Image: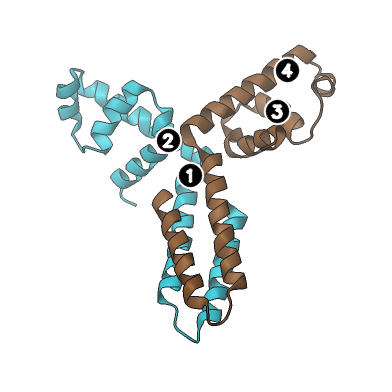
Chain colours: A cyan, B brown
Amino acid sequence: MEKKVMQTYLYDFYGDLLTEHQRNIYEEYVWNDLSLSEIAQEKGISRQGVHDLVRRCDRILADYEEKLHLLERFLKNKEKILKIQTLSRNYQNGKEAQAMAEIEAISNEILEEL
Amino acid sequence: MEKKVMQTYLYDFYGDLLTEHQRNIYEEYVWNDLSLSEIAQEKGISRQGVHDLVRRCDRILADYEEKLHLLERFLKNKEKILKIQTLSRNYQNGKEAQAMAEIEAISNEILEEL
């Protein structure tokens, strides 16, 4: 996964655990894709200050993921639900029993891991 | 939901965010269902100390739930996946198109909220 995409995911999951100040800066970085210098200018703080805050937020978010695994579980579940969605959309008449068996197997897997 | 059940759920989701000391005490309370006095005796601390720690852990876990909503989302998703499981198990021949349409609708709902 590309770094910025992963930072955005982690921020979506754990952003509410950052302080308001951290969120203000980090959102400019991950959501609005501003450079460190642009953020520094906009917020009236040093580029080094922005750099340190972004790195610190990266670390905090990574620590939460290491403990809670929300992103990891989200990606796994999304893949399985997408399979269910595809099976239910594209089942062929006469093969519905097979599709239903697969759907049941996948739903069982998800339930075991929820 | 019964209080002990909710405490157990919240501990399952967020327990790794507590300190080791907090986990040691809180697990005796939520998993092993010991009384405050029994834990105090076992750990060699005062009953009041156990009481305060348990209340503090309750608050920490509730704060995480307020921000991350893992339990709330888990319960919603579980309900939907159980519906998918039931539909796939119990579909009737000749009504598979209807069951598949429902399964697709539910999987869409889950994907939107993941």
* Labels 1, 4: front one: 4
Give the residue at x 57% y 68%.
B87
What's the amino acid at mark 4?
A: His
Q: Secondary structure at mark 3?
A: helix
CA distance separating discs 1 and 3: 23 Å
Is B93 left, or right, of A61 in this rendering?
right
Numbered label attached to residue A104: none
Asked if A38 appears above or below A83 in the picture, the reply is above
Both labels 4 and 2 in a single chain = no
The first of marks 3 and 4 along the sequence is 3
Q: Residues within 10 Å of mark 4 (few under 14, many from 20)?
A: some
Q: Is residue B80 rendered to the left or right of residue A87?
A: right
Give the residue displayed 67% in from the left and 24% down from the top.
B21
**Location of residue A21 in the rendering, given as x and y in whole percent from the top left corner:** 32, 21
State the image coordinates of residue B20 (x, y, percent, origin top left): 65, 28
B74 in relation to B107, above or below: above
Mark 2 lies on residue: A14
Q: Residue flagged by tag 1: what amino acid is it?
A: Leu
Residues tagged by mark 1 and mark 3 found on one chain of the structure: no
Report the Cα–Cα distance between label 4 and label 2.
30 Å
